[in-house]
Image (tube, rainbow, N blue to C red):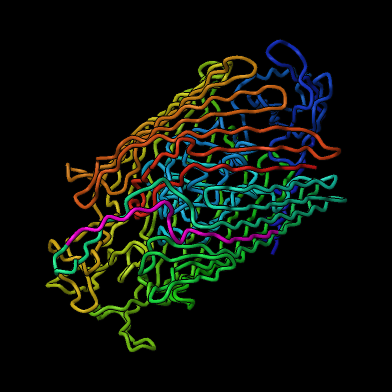
């Protein structure tokens, strides 16, 4: 008892000990011309304390021993200053930059976008609002290294450096979005860019904090649904916009207020749109029989993509208590969305009418559309200690109930559901000269599918992980080290004709024979990186990472017709012998990535750039390979023969070694106080090892330029992006022609009473260029939208 009491007392003393040398630090913040900077934020790192400099750039703030001050101001590079109780009055000089600096929440260590070792892009403020589209893929595809899967404009997910699907983790405030977008390209993401404060794209493996699903990168949508700063007065925003290309109307609103450390948040959006218009294009050729019994080719054209409507509404509530040390908060969000799924119906010519009365002519079948419903809860607890070695203790909780129903002929055809529970606990600490974070991450996902398109069986996926991330500064060099150990388990009942006698077998309600299957993996990830600020405003970075990823249930256990892609899909756990499918999930190996990133940055003065080179060597890369077989319900599996197009091509997940490498860059030059020009682009090469060919559906390279001009209350921009021809293809792909898109924006700002108002017009695809997305499963049936005028108004109060 005495021993336990002494241990408990020691722990309590360590966790609750306040510095006996608490002190007040004073200082002044100046620019590079030795002029004071007012309203600069001065923050004690790891604490909930922030003050602003006065008109003379001066500040006074309470600190504990061995603290760090984080000093930031728009259009200046952030400064971090180590201080203690003996520090004299400080004089801090901030270097101006023409690049906006923002804190990257996904970095975990409070780094801004210029301090990150790994490449990162952040969309925020008016830039995000001007580029926001109904999907994340379309919103982000203009960033270097980022493209979109494009299953029509209402179902488009991000592709980062040629990797998509389960290799790109999509999160909201650091927790998984928990939808079904990783299962199939026709499933839209559930994240809404309109309500976001900023969207962060971390390129390269980010598995240390976010799990094995982040082997290609992370897209983190940050909002303020759980306020983490006290709100002193009622603020809000409203927006309305209209898109001519799809007759779409979008409404959005946000309200925030607070009193006595309690804060409240509300936001909501409503979006409706019809099928989108395109330049005239040839529909995929189909063979028809003429009156004399001969085959002839019928060439049809179209100027719109049928069944691409959207009707969506979201609502989110959040509240929090923010004290000097403790922050507690909770939020709830509801999504209800109906959207058309192009190339998913059985006949051409389907029409969509408002209110989802899907009229169809006699003898025609009705188009298929998706109905998505999601309830999402998030919780936050953060405690900032006045302690020399433990800075903050954080806990984030999430629960998501997602349901995706596909409606055919007015009836539910297939239902996909995903119920997810997630918890992330971490302790931010300082050990000697090392500053870092250690924690535990838990996630459990219960996925189910029932209906004609249930090509993946129900499964339960559980992951438990420990992670650590540490950094230390050595002069002008900052070194970062990290590791993650993850236990990953999949449980399912598999419908199969061949069984392992060690598995329990039973039958479902339809009499199908099922095999109880369970598989566990241990994923180890580690990384090391450094950034060298070799001169003020310029740096070079290098990082090396090792990441392991276990297959998703869809990659491992798929066995059935995937109507959206028009294929029959088989997972890694199956083999084909003598025209029959057998379940033999032996020797399933993890996908293992070794990634090297090398980057140069300049962000001071009128000229700046970011250039990143990457090389990703992946062992056991999972991808879908055309087997050369076709499937039809009458004959089962058959060898594909010319002229025989009644069946569906059979694609199977296989694992082979692959290499992906390339470059991405963006540069800017401030011509004068009113004008700036930007240049950006990327190139990705993705091949199988040993010269076995290219990987399928790799995005085309792109090169673009943007001119920004500001005069008085007007802001203008003109962007041109060229997507090159993609002819690095597999045997079962076709090349995709290049195309060039021009977009323009004009914003006018004025103040009407207490409301700051902004009127804007965006013109997308000014020249009405016909463009096909190589990475799309339905590229020939769904080209990019034609010329679009987007007119809108925003108000802030």
**Front residue (pair 305, 649):** 305
- Residue 794, percent across and down? 71, 42
From where the camera sits, is residue 3 visible?
A: no
Q: Quadrant of residue 436?
A: top right
In the image, residue 346 sits, relative to residue 207, either above or below, namely below
From where the camera sits, is residue 790 visible?
A: yes
- Residue 300, percent across and down? 31, 56
- Residue 164, percent across and down? 40, 50
640 relative to 111 in the view: left or right: left
Q: Residue furthest front?
A: 291
The reply to whether the magenta stretch includes residue 305 is yes
In the image, residue 376 sits, relative to residue 253, either above or below, namely below
Residue drawn where x is 66% and y is 24% of the image:
75
The reply to whether the magenta stretch includes residue 670 is no
Q: Quadrant of the C terminus?
A: top right
Q: Quadrant of the N terminus?
A: bottom right
Residue drawn where x is 67% and y is 20% of the image:
94
Which segment did they paint magenta?
Answer: 296-316
**Front residue (pair 282, 264):** 282
**Front residue (pair 785, 163):** 785
Residue drawn where x is 30% and y is 79% of the image:
503
In the image, residue 152 sits, relative to residue 535, either above or below, namely below
87 relative to 648 in the view: left or right: right
Q: Quadrant of residue 177?
A: bottom right
634 relative to 268 in the view: left or right: left
In the image, residue 565 sits, relative to residue 120, either above or below, namely below
**Secondary structure, magenta segment, majority class:** strand
Q: Quadrant of residue 386?
A: top right
Q: Residue furthest top?
A: 33
**Front residue (pair 525, 41):** 41
């Amino acid at each position: 008892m005495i021993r336990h009491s002494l241990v408990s007392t020691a722990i309590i003393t360590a966790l609750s000990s306040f510095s006996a040398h608490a002190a007040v630090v004073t200082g002044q913040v100046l620019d590079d011309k030795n002029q004071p900077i007012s309203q600069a934020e001065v923050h004690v790192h790891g604490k909930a304390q922030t003050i602003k400099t006065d008109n003379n750039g001066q500040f006074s703030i309470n600190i504990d021993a061995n603290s760090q001050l984080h000093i930031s101001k728009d259009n200046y590079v952030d400064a971090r200053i180590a201080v203690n109780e003996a520090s004299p009055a400080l004089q801090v000089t901030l270097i101006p930059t023409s690049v906006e600096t923002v804190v990257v929440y996904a970095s975990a260590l409070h780094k801004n976008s210029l301090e990150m070792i790994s490449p990162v892009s952040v969309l925020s403020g008016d830039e995000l609002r001007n580029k926001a589209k109904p999907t994340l893929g379309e919103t982000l595809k203009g960033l270097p290294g980022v493209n979109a899967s494009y299953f029509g404009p209402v179902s488009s997910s991000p592709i980062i450096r040629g990797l998509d699907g389960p290799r790109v983790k999509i999160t909201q405030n650091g927790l998984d979005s928990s939808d079904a977008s990783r299962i199939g390209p026709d499933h839209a993401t559930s994240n809404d860019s309109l309500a976001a404060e900023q969207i962060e794209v971390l390129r390269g493996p980010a598995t240390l904090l976010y799990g094995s699903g982040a082997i290609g990168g992370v897209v983190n949508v940050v909002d303020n649904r759980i306020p983490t700063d006290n709100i002193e007065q009622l603020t809000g925003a409203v927006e309305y916009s209209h898109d001519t290309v799809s007759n779409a109307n979008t409404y959005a609103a946000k309200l925030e207020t607070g009193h006595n450390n309690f804060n409240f948040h509300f936001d909501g959006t409503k979006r409706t749109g019809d099928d989108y218009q395109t330049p005239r294009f040839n529909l995929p050729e189909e063979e028809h029989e003429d009156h004399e019994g001969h085959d002839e080719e019928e060439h049809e054209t179209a100027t719109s993509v049928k069944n691409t409507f959207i009707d969506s509404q979201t609502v989110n509530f959040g509240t929090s208590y923010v004290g000097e040390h403790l922050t507690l908060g909770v939020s709830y969000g509801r999504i209800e969305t109906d959207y058309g799924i192009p190339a998913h119906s059985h006949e051409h010519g389907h029409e969509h009418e408002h209110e989802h009365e899907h009229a169809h002519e006699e003898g025609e079948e009705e188009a298929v559309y998706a109905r998505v419903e999601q309830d999402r809860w998030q919780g936050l607890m953060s405690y900032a200690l006045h302690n020399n070695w433990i800075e903050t203790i954080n806990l984030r909780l999430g629960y998501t109930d997602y349901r995706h129903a596909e409606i055919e002929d007015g009836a539910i055809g297939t239902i996909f559901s995903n119920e997810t529970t997630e918890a992330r606990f971490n302790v931010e600490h300082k050990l000697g000269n090392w500053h870092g974070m250690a924690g535990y991450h838990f996630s459990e996902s219960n996925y189910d599918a029932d209906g004609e398109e249930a090509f993946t069986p129900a499964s339960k996926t559980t992951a438990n992980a420990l992670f650590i991330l540490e950094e230390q500064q050595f002069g002008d060099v900052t070194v970062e080290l990290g590791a993650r150990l993850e236990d990953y388990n999949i449980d399912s009942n598999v419908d199969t004709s061949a069984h392992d006698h060690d598995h329990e077998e039973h039958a479902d309600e339809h009499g199908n024979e099922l095999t109880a299957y369970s598989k566990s993996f241990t994923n180890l990830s580690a990384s090391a990186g450094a950034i060298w600020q070799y001169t003020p405003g310029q740096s070079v970075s290098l990082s090396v990472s090792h990441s392991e990823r276990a297959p998703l249930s869809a990659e491992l256990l798929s066995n059935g017709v995937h109507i959206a892609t028009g294929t029959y899909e088989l997972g890694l756990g199956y083999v084909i012998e003598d025209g029959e499918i057998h379940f033999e999930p032996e020797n399933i190996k993890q996908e293992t990535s070794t990634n090297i990133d090398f980057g140069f940055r300049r962000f001071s003065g009128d000229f700046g750039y970011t250039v990143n080179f990457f090389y990703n060597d992946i062992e056991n890369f999972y991808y879908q390979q055309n087997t050369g077989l076709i499937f039809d319900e009458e004959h089962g599996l058959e060898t594909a023969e010319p002229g025989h197009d009644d069946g569906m091509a059979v694609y199977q997940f296989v694992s082979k070694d692959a290499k992906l490498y390339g470059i991405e860059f963006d540069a800017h030059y401030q011509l004068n106080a009113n004008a700036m020009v930007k240049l950006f682009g990327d190139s990705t090469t993705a091949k199988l090892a040993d010269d076995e060919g290219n990987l399928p559906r790799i995005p085309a390279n792109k090169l673009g330029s943007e001119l920004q001009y500001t005069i008085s209350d007007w802001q203008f921009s003109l962007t041109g992006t060229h997507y090159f021809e993609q002819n690095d293809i597999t045997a079962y792909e076709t090349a995709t022609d290049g195309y060039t898109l021009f977009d323009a924006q004009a914003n006018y700002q004025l103040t009407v009473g207490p409301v700051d108002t902004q009127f804007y017009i965006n013109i997308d695809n000014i020249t009405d260029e016909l463009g096909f997305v190589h990475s799309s499963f339905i590229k020939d049936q769904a080209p990019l939208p034609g010329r679009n005028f987007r007119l809108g108004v925003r108000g802030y109060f």
